[in-house]
Image (cartoon, rainbow, N blue to C red):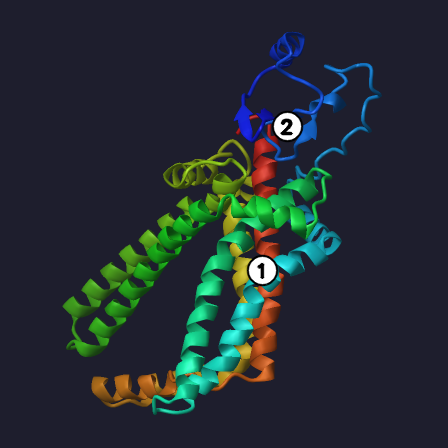
Amino acid sequence: MVRVQGKEYGPVDLEELREWKEEGRLIRDNEVREPETGRWIPAGELPELFSDRPAPPPIPPPIVRQTSLGGLLAQTWKIYRAHFAQFLGLSALVIVPSICLQLSSAAVSGGSELDLRNALAGLFNLGMVAASFVAWPIYVAGIQILTSEAAFGHPLGLADVVPRALKYWSRVALLCVLVYGAFFLLLVLALAILVMVAAGEPGFLMIFVALALLFFQVWMFGRVFINVLFWQQAAVLENTGAVDSLRRSKELAQSGRNQPWWQRPAWQGVIISSLWCLLAAGISIGPEWSALTGYYHTLTTAQDTQAMVQSLSAAAKPAAPTVWTIALSALQTVLRPLLGIAFVLIYLNLKAAPNE
């Protein structure tokens, strides 16, 4: 790929580049890169074209092709540890608005009257929510870019990652709405099934219909989950549009059928996601334990549906955030790049395989 005055041309092969050089269309200062990487270098650094300059030092081989799950996890941790400062900076983009939102939410919920204090706190909360929505696509795209470059031995600073991530903001934001919205609708469907069972008369037909709907809901959740496993890599690393990213994600998830099941990208993605869910649940279970036990007690002791709904609504009122809950929430965000790094490595492993 060749970039001249902000416009990209290609991909072209080496012979065509030599012709462009002879015609004066390619000079030393023009930027070039290989299609599968995002690192631009001056064309003058290519000894194949400008042999009068010494060849640059060899690029380290990509640290991918980890066939075992243990090797994948070890490489994930290695990249995260080596570039912790950059990942922490990306995480701060979403941590800071989240902490500010939690701290100011108490001011809004602390009083029921609409006074100046509550109005200002509400406006501030709205601004923090908007800031979180703006920062999240940058955070997602930045993890993809930073991990990909680190895997090929091209470490980037945060000042380089954020501007590149901004180029994908609109696409990633749209895909976040589509993907997360699909899971939200599936969750609403599951809750609707539970309410229908709780409100209906017990009987064989009701139980059969509820089980059938739950089976369909689980099947739909699994299908959607598999099909969108690699949407972030397709949208950022392959630079495809929103619709094409979803199609490409499905293709990537269904590839590798000639490999053992534990080396297939879909199974690796499912296992990595499950491990992350266990880790996130372990981090969050402490502050939420009393609420969970309250829900369980309500479900097992309520005499009728209306009383159960009222009790659950009362138990669901958010408590004032504490230093402990805020710290655990921040810790979860700081560790979340581990999930993104693992998926990028799965993607790079798949692209480095002889046959996709």
Query: Cα distance, mark 1 to mark 2?
Result: 30 Å
Tell me the element at label 1: loop
- Residue 262 lies left or right of residue 60; in this view the side is left
Per the rendering, the mark at residue 263 is none
Tell me the element at label 2: loop
Q: Amino acid at mark 2?
A: Arg
Find residue 41 and report its image quarter: top right
The image shows residue 49, relative to residue 106, as above or below, that is above
- Residue position for label 1: 336
Compare residues 336 and 146 and report the one nearer the observer: 146
- Which is more N-terminal, label 2 or label 1? 2
Q: Position of residue 57 (x, y in %)?
A: 82, 29
- Residue 322 lies left or right of residue 248; in this view the side is right
Q: Position of residue 172 (x, y in %)?
A: 45, 48
Q: How many marks?
A: 2
Q: Amino acid at mark 1?
A: Arg
- Residue position for label 2: 33
Compare residues 174 and 65 and report the one nearer the observer: 174
